Amino acid sequence: QLQLVESGGGLVQPGGSLSLSCAASGFSFDYYAIGWFRQAPGKEREGVSCISKGGGVSNYADSVKGRFSISRDNAKNTVYLRIHSLKPEDTAIYYCAASPRCRSLDLIDEYIYWGQGTQVTVSS
């Protein structure tokens, strides 16, 4: 059964850090780029970051550059998103998704497999 399962979300104070994981199973993980998206209440889903199949190429939304770092371990079928200097506006449900390629984060329709999401709340 094809699955993407996010974990690592939680409540964190502004300025804090989190590490999200996206564990994949049921498909050829290393054939796909993986992206992270987020959706805040009342807002559209937006792309945060993506990483290519082999991990050599990554892309970040301007709003997270310098604070978010994406990586993958194909031996573990897992992609990680490390988040630093968290801000209240980072509060959202974070989703990972699989795509044939890591390109513009606006091309959300290219992502064909999705996880259920993990909640990140940034609040004092």
Image (cartoon, rainbow, N blue to C red):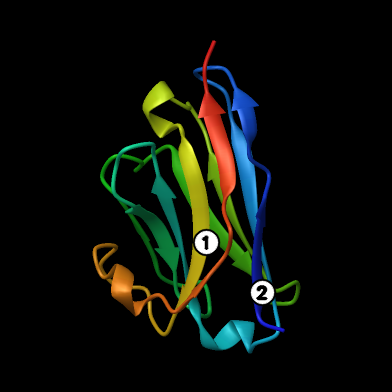
Dot 2, how many residues are within 10 Å of its Cα: few (below 14), some (14-19), or many (20+)? some
| Disc 1: CA contacts within 10 A as few (<14), some (14-19) or many (>=20) | many
Q: Would you identify the image quadrant in which residue 67 lies?
A: top left
Image coords of residue 79 (percent x, y): 61, 63
Tell me if residue 102 comes above or below residue 31 in the rendering: above
Which percent across, then down, holds residue 10?
65, 33
Placement of the C terminus among the 4 image quadrants: top right
**Amino acid at circle 1:** Cys
Residue at the farthest front position:
42
Q: Quadrant where the N terminus lies? A: bottom right
Residue 81 rendering spot, x and y as whole percentages: 55, 51
In this view, the residue farthest toward the top is 124
Give me the residue at 50% from left, 48% from top: 94
Assign a secondary structure to mark 1: strand
- Which disc, if any, is residue 96? 1
User: What residue sits 75% from the left and 72% below the top?
Assistant: 76
* Image coordinates for residue 11, horizontal then vertical, percent: 62, 26
In this figure, which residue is indicated by the disc labeled 2? Answer: 3
